[in-house]
């Protein structure tokens, strides 16, 4: 019999599995994150353990995927950040302020994933949205940033 915690971690691992990391590796990391979540869970915060654990596991998966080397050459054209001089700290600070002021949380998260080097396909899986919608959001955010710089 599979426990609820294993089922939760398996579902999240399946959702995040991609060319950078396979489902079984994510499942193992997810179980470790679940144990960490149960150890740090505070029932007085009026949040269910499952909700809290989902957030902890998801954050762990995102961190792991960001640290993986870029093996997805299929979408290299989508990963260019040359539109913005992100190496220049002044621009980065300016861009972060623009994002905070003019873009909603989900658009900001999607754009941050794009900036981190995730492909549209990977972002699509992470946020469970169609690839075209990811492209539309990235283009919209780029347009907003360009209009404010």
Image (tube, grey):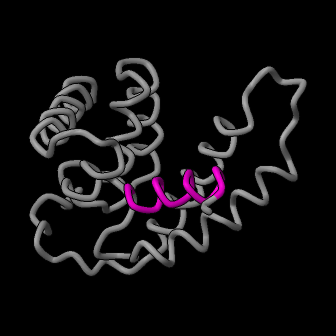
Q: Viewer-proximal residue, 92 or 75?
A: 75
- From the top left corner, tell me how far across and down residue 36 is, in percent: 79, 58
- From the top left corner, tell me how far across and down residue 37 is, in percent: 76, 51
Question: Which residue is pictured at 20% across the width and 33% down the height?
Answer: 137
Q: Viewer-proximal residue, 54 or 101?
A: 54
In which quadrant of the rendered image does the N terminus lie?
Answer: bottom right
Residue 23 against residue 128 in the figure, above or below: below
Q: Is residue 8 left or right of residue 77?
A: right
- The magenta stretch spans which residues? 3-15
In which quadrant of the rendered image does the C terminus lie?
Answer: top left
Q: Is residue 74 left or right of residue 63?
A: left
Question: Which residue is pictured at 46% across the width and 54% down the height?
Answer: 11
Question: Which quadrant of the structure image shows residue 98?
Answer: top left
Magenta segment's dominant SS is: helix
- From the top left corner, tell me how far across and down residue 84 is, in percent: 25, 48
- Is residue 118 on the magenta stretch? no
Residue 69 against residue 134 in the figure, above or below: below
Q: Viewer-proximal residue, 106 or 33?
A: 33
Residue 25 against residue 35 in the figure, above or below: below
Q: Is residue 120 left or right of residue 118?
A: left
- From the top left corner, tell me how far across and down residue 55 is, in percent: 61, 43
- Is residue 10 on the magenta stretch? yes
Question: Which residue is pictured at 60% across the width and 54% down the height?
Answer: 57
């Amino acid at each position: 019999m599979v426990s609820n915690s294993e089922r939760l971690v398996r579902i999240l691992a399946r959702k995040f599995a991609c060319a950078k990391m396979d489902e079984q590796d994510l499942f193992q990391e997810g179980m470790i994150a679940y144990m960490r979540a149960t150890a740090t869970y505070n029932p007085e915060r009026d949040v269910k353990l499952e909700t809290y654990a989902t957030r902890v596991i998801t954050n762990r998966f995102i961190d792991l995927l960001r640290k993986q080397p870029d093996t997805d050459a299929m979408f290299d054209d989508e990963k260019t950040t040359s539109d913005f001089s992100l190496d220049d700290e002044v621009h980065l600070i300016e861009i972060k302020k623009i994002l905070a002021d003019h873009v909603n949380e989900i658009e900001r998260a999607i754009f941050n994933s794009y900036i981190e080097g995730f492909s549209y396909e990977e972002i699509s899986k992470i946020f469970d949205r169609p690839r075209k919608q990811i492209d539309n959001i990235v283009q919209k955010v780029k347009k907003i940033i360009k209009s404010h710089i």
